[in-house]
Image (cartoon, rainbow, N blue to C red):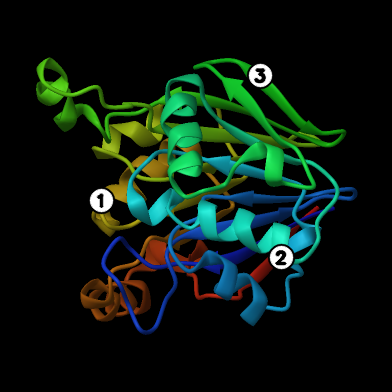
Amino acid sequence: MLKIKFIGTGSAKTSLKRNFTSLLFKTSSENILIDCGEGTSKALIQQNVELNSIDKIIISHLHSDHFTGLAGLITNFKLDQRKKPIHLFTHQSNVPFIKNYLLSSLIIPERMDFEILFKEFTENEEVNLSEDLKFVAKQNSHLDKYKIHKKNYSLPSASPTFLFIHYGKKIIYTSDIGSADDLLLFSEPIDILICEISHIELNQLIDLAKKLNPSEIYLIHIPDEKEKDILEFLSSDSEAGKIVLTFDGLEVAVY
């Protein structure tokens, strides 16, 4: 069984109701944190997750609401006298930036009592996270708008959509997307769709989800100003029965 705990369900705009989007995948043997925006350490503690119980971290992309809590989390590992390594998974183009970010935050490997082990992945590569969970990542269009700046800046541009596979169950996690078409990067039918709702409208999501045919859709990355309209839509649309507006602390099981 895989348990998915929604540590944060908010958008990039700071909210008093929701933490920045972050998920915890709890397999039979490991705890895997997916994305780590500002305040994730506090959010984990509030939800009774022991920080040192986290075995691996996946960083989807480098917008601040998805990764700037990493330095604080690693600092707390040290303060909690962590000994076991932390495995950090991210696209290979993000690694130099993250390493420099950690050093700039005075997280110096030689001063840690545990190893920070970077695990780079590339597009379309199958990556084993544990004995019962793996993923494949495909580049989406979320960061396409930044390409114009590459003449003057060196910007990491990886923003994948993830397909997780757990004993045959297929789970798509969109992180952030650039357009509705990014939901169709994986064409095969899936079981669960975890989809951000900041950059897509619900009617678009419902139309496209028919092609993927998930049994459950969990909405994340929820802007406060959009929540009322989402709730009204879900209560009035006959197609919305399998859609869940998530909240911080929600935990679901995947069998």
Q: Nearer the viewer, mark 2 or mark 1?
A: 2
Query: Is 177 or 85 nearer to us in this picture?
Result: 85
Residue beneath disc 3: 126
User: Is 116 on the left or on the right of 71, as rendered?
Assistant: right
Can you give x and y, in whole percent of width and height, for residue 137 in the image?
52, 26
Can you give x and y, in whole percent of width and height, for residue 182 in the image?
34, 33
Say which mark, if any, is on residue 66: none
| Inter-mark Cα distance, 1 to 3 | 27 Å
**Residue 217, placed above or below residue 6:** above
Residue lying at 43% horizontally and 43% vertically, measured from the top left = 104
Q: Residues within 10 Å of mark 3 (few under 14, many from 20)?
A: some
Amino acid type at mark 2: Leu
Can you give x and y, in whole percent of width and height, for residue 109 in the image?
66, 38
User: Is 204 on the left or on the right of 83, as rendered?
Assistant: left
Residue beneath disc 1: 200
Q: Secondary structure at mark 1?
A: loop
Residue 187 visible in image:
no
Query: Is 193 or 162 nearer to us in this picture?
Result: 162
Q: Say whether marks 2 and 1 touch (CB < 8 Å).
A: no
Q: Nearer the viewer, mark 2 or mark 3?
A: 2
Residue lying at 78% horizontally and 60% vertically, measured from the top left = 52
Q: Secondary structure at mark 3?
A: strand
Mark 2 or mark 3: whose residue is earlier in sequence: 2
Q: Residues within 10 Å of mark 1 (few under 14, many from 20)?
A: some
Name which quarter of the figure residue 167 lies in. top right
Mark 2 or mark 1: whose residue is earlier in sequence: 2
Q: Residues within 10 Å of mark 2 (few under 14, many from 20)?
A: few
Say which mark, if any, is on residue 79: 2
Q: Say whether marks 2 and 3 touch (CB < 8 Å).
A: no
| Inter-mark Cα distance, 2 to 3 | 34 Å
